[in-house]
Amino acid sequence: MARVRRRGRLVGAVLAAVLGVSLAGCSSTGGLRAEQERAAKSAGGKAAVNTPRWTFAMVTHSGDGDTFWDIVQNGAQQAAVKDNIKFVYGHDKEAQRQSQLVQSYIDQKVDGLIVSLAKPSAMKDVIAKAEKAGIPVITVNSGAEASKAFGALSHIGQDETVAGEAVGEELNKRGRKKALCVLHEQGNVGHEQRCDGAEKTFKGDLQKLYVEGTNMPDVQSSIESKLQADSSIDAVVTLGAPFAPTAVKAKEQAGSKAEIDTFDLNAQVATGLKDGSLGFAVDQQPYLQGYEAVDLLWLYKYNSDVLGGGKPVLTGPQVITKKDAAALQDYTKRGTR
Amino acid sequence: MSHTDAPPLGPAGPPAKSAGDERLLHRSLARRLMGRPELGSVVGAAAVFVFFSIVAEPFLRASSLSTVLYASSTIGIMAVPVALLMIGGEFDLSAGVMVVSSALISSMFSYQMTADTWVGVGVSLLVTLAIGAFNGLLLTRTKLPSFIITLGTFFMLTGLNLGFTKLIDGTVSTKSIADMEGFESARKVFASHLTIGSVDIQITILWWLVLVAVATWVLLRTRVGNWIFAVGGNADAARAVGVPVTKTKIGLYMGVAFAAWVSGQHLLFSYDAIQSGDGVGNEFLYIIAAAVGGCLMTGGFGSAIGAAVGAFIFGMASKGIVYAQWNPDWYKFFLGAMLLLATLLNAWVRKRAEEKA
């Protein structure tokens, strides 16, 4: 018991963040072991409620094999098991095909819809149709501005500009003068907002660099070239976790002294934070986005509850540094952080 | 399989003389044209080089050039066998994803079996070569266009990469194998860098040069080289004179697979963990490099050195834009325009050279 409590203190800060927002976690306070037990229990497929078995569908703008959305999906699935929900998932990075997917779930008369709004205008009509069909919709991740206007119950996600601003402030705190913002997908609105947000609060100079996100050697050599071209760059911010270790390699190759920081989290980033090769990570807690979306839909169906009063419910930004990294390593390894 | 091979192989014996004549003809033709694909692309490369030397101050530093060479080599390693395949008259749209498949196989096999990473690397070589052979076999057996066959493989591999990784590792990227036995030695072979003077040379550059040398030797000095030009020029005529068309094409696809294995191992040992969704779209970079380097899209003409120069042009253009510190909003446009200009210049020079000849 004592050991559990000590460990609980160690990871207290982190758990408080997880459990504080997580409705389901409200009753439980207990440390790493309890967390793992609960995960094991929900993964074991036991529902905690006896409400009817509703079907919720989630449709995102994720590309194939996207680490971030994989964690969102894990969160949604675990909440679904707990809430006795049949969870179905579809994704397409093309807005038009994403809206067709939503339409197909409306045709199947699902009991609830979770939709990401990366390109809001493309989703407007289909969300109106869902509303007409009496299917409650919760929007996640991107599209906070459009969510309410489209008639969604609530929005769960991170304001990208706010997250960017957090990065700018953290860079100031660390005394950085010239930062590089590495965008791995040209034309992604959220990416631009992150960099713009960072530019807004950052007192130094911030430059953008576009790289080919599906081609790691290209990412490395591009960052390398940029650091060689401008040796005064003292911070590199990548917008996705997989690119942070690559930026570290690029920095070493270029012989630069820049600090590497990143948005999002994964096992490699947690390790990098721990061993000091990375400065900090700004996490928007994708697990929460999936988990909360399912749980809030369940609450709405069960109890007509709506969280946030029509305002977006933010899941981030959470700034993670060396001191949090050790506790997060296990969670990143099992794919929930 | 063997009985379809038999007919072209059988008559290969008797008409050896005529085949010899034909081959001589092809070789001399190839010889006469040989200088030109390189000539065009070399002029293009020189133009791009001079351009960036002028507009981008850091471009000429030794460290920058080594970065450019690294970027070129990761494309160039694949562009060489892709060029050979194009000379042989075929495409491979699965080449980009195959690189990632190869990396995923070694990573997951080593991790799941807790085997020495070299075992995973070996298994990956066998499986990747099998994928290449599958492409070649399907192509020669069905006689469907390579565009369709390899597009099918492309989608299947993309799906398998994601499906298997998720199934085995639970997430969409592989677990790090950096702490496993054999990792360090494998990293030395596939992803190390040598310091010569003050310049860092990535080992992929050596792999690239060796592949170019081997491919050039095969094309110009061996019978197989003549077969490649022959099947790309006119497969039926080639078969009629006893060229083993089926074997040559399967071999070419396996060559692509071998290079995909090398690139895949580089990815793995360079970045520890592999994203299963990567690699999509890279096949076009390889084809572009080969085409810029003077390989005809219709087959029968081109060179490995040209493809290497094509990859070098691509590497210079993509990194030169960064060194020049241009507005990144226009990045893709600059890249496209640069490639188009290099290719046009290449074609123009070749035309001039042909007129003079």
Image (cartoon, coloured by chain):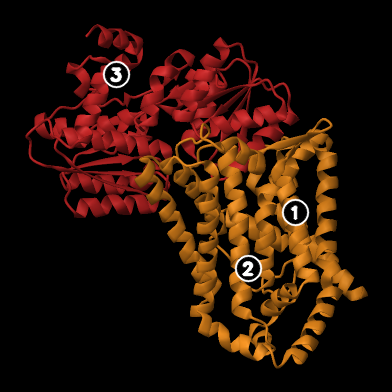
* Mark 3, residue position: A32
Measured along the vertical axis of the image, is residue A302 above or below residue B262? Answer: above
All told, the count of numbered labels is 3
* Mark 2, residue position: B252
* Mark pair 2, 3: CA separation: 54 Å
The chain drawn in red is A
Would you say the residues marked 2 and 3 are in contact, meaning their CB atoms lie under 8 Å apart?
no
Question: Foreground residue, A12 or A102?
Answer: A12
Q: Position of residue A202 (x, y in %)?
A: 57, 17
Measured along the vertical axis of the image, is residue A142 above or below residue B7? Answer: above
Residue B341 visible in the picture: no
The chain drawn in orange is B
Element marked by disc 3: helix
Q: Is residue A45 left or right of residue A233?
A: left
* Mark 1, residue position: B210
Q: Quadrant of residue A292?
A: top left
Same-chain status of marks 3 and 1 = no
Q: Is residue A97 left or right of residue B137?
A: left
Measured along the vertical axis of the image, is residue A143 above or below residue A315? Answer: below
Question: Foreground residue, A66 or A307?
Answer: A66
The quadrant of the picture occupied by the C terminus of chain B is: bottom right
* Mark pair 3, 1: CA separation: 52 Å
Q: Position of residue A106 (x, y in %)?
A: 21, 51
